[in-house]
Amino acid sequence: MSPRRTTAASTERSRPTTPLRFGYGTNGLTDLRLDDALGLLADLGYDGVGLTLDHMHLDPLAPDLAARTARVARRLDALGLDVAVETGARYVLDPRRKHGPSLLDADPDDRARRVDLLVRAVRVAADLGAYALHCFSGITPAGTDPDTAWKRLAEALTPVVEAAATARVPLAIEPEPGHLLATLADFHRLRRELGDPEPLGLTLDIGHCQCLEPRPPADCVRDAAPWLRHVQIEDMRRRVHEHLPLGEGEIDFPSVLTALADTGYRGLTVVELPRHSHAGPHFAEQSLPFLHRATAPPAPPPGDPSATPEGSTA
């Protein structure tokens, strides 16, 4: 799906030229009304937004979803923001159980509630003109053997994949530390078990690569490129699943962003700092310049002829 049109206001914003396009996740702006969050991101110069469907931001379970979605679509268009729809809200289905129910729950009615949410999200994504719909597997319930969990996941995702195919919205599942589907290898297992359906792609979280994957994040980007539909980014340390502001962890951002650009990825690279919402506007303001600096070519070394100012006789 092609990016949203750019408005005159957004073209006037001065920012470095880069083949990558950056967004910020609304799960890191939960203290703001959605309309205010979108206006903030446009004013800061972001190209788009990772929109988490939640009770405070385009509640997928409240009445008049289609009408509310249409209003958000008009707002995105007016601001020139592209969008990916994300479904990682912690308590949107169950106020007492984080990310529950999941696609792996023993109770088929509970699994069906998660499936219904994802199918609703497919329709929202289509109506917003989103380039991808994000989802995840969930944590394996206690006492559930792995084969049963994988079978439940494949069966539960099948109607979601079918809905995504009908709506022409790529489905981008995210490997999440602690979940059944936690690594790139797990993604490929699911892909094979479902028969490699065309709509099924990958959300790659760069921090999760740093946390869990055996290869460096830049190599993970290159490995994932054929299936890459959506990217989330934050800083992180090895073996510690803690989303950190950019520059506070161990990730080599220039190498990761170069790898993304080299693959030809054209979706958004969305900053994900869900535990920093208390200072969301601050971190949104700080993150975009950091990413632009990380994409800038390195300065020539001292004495390099290209470092001599034009017209200088030095």
Image (spheres, rainbow, N blue to C red):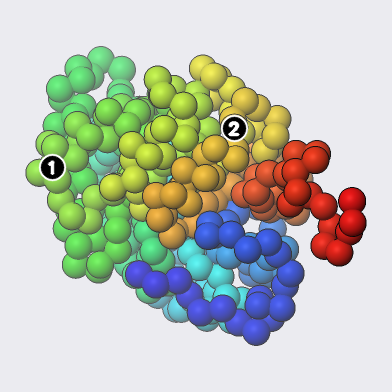
Quadrant including the N terminus = bottom left
**Numbered mark located on residue 76 in the image:** none
Q: Residue furthest front?
A: 313
Q: Residue furthest bottom?
A: 8
Kind of residue indicated by mark 1: Leu
Q: Residue at x 84, y 57 (%)?
A: 309
Disc 2, SS: loop
What residue is shown at x 54% (from left), y 51% (from top)?
A: 270
Q: Residues within 10 Å of mark 2 (few under 14, many from 20)?
A: some
Residue 6 percent coordinates (x, y): 56, 78
Which percent across, then down, holds residue 33?
Answer: 66, 63
Residue 234 seen in render = no
Side of 84 where 192 appears, left or right: left
Q: Residue at x 43, y 60 (%)?
A: 266
User: Is 36 rendered above or below residue 162?
Assistant: below
Going by the picture, which residue comes out furthest to the right?
A: 313
> Is 218 on the left-hand or right-hand side of 127?
right
Distance from the alpha carbon under mark 1 to that under mark 2: 34 Å
Q: Identify the residue under disc 2.
A: 252
- Of 311 and 149, nearer the camera is 311
Mark 1 vs 2, N-terminal side: 1
**Residue 92: percent from the left, percent from the top?**
46, 48
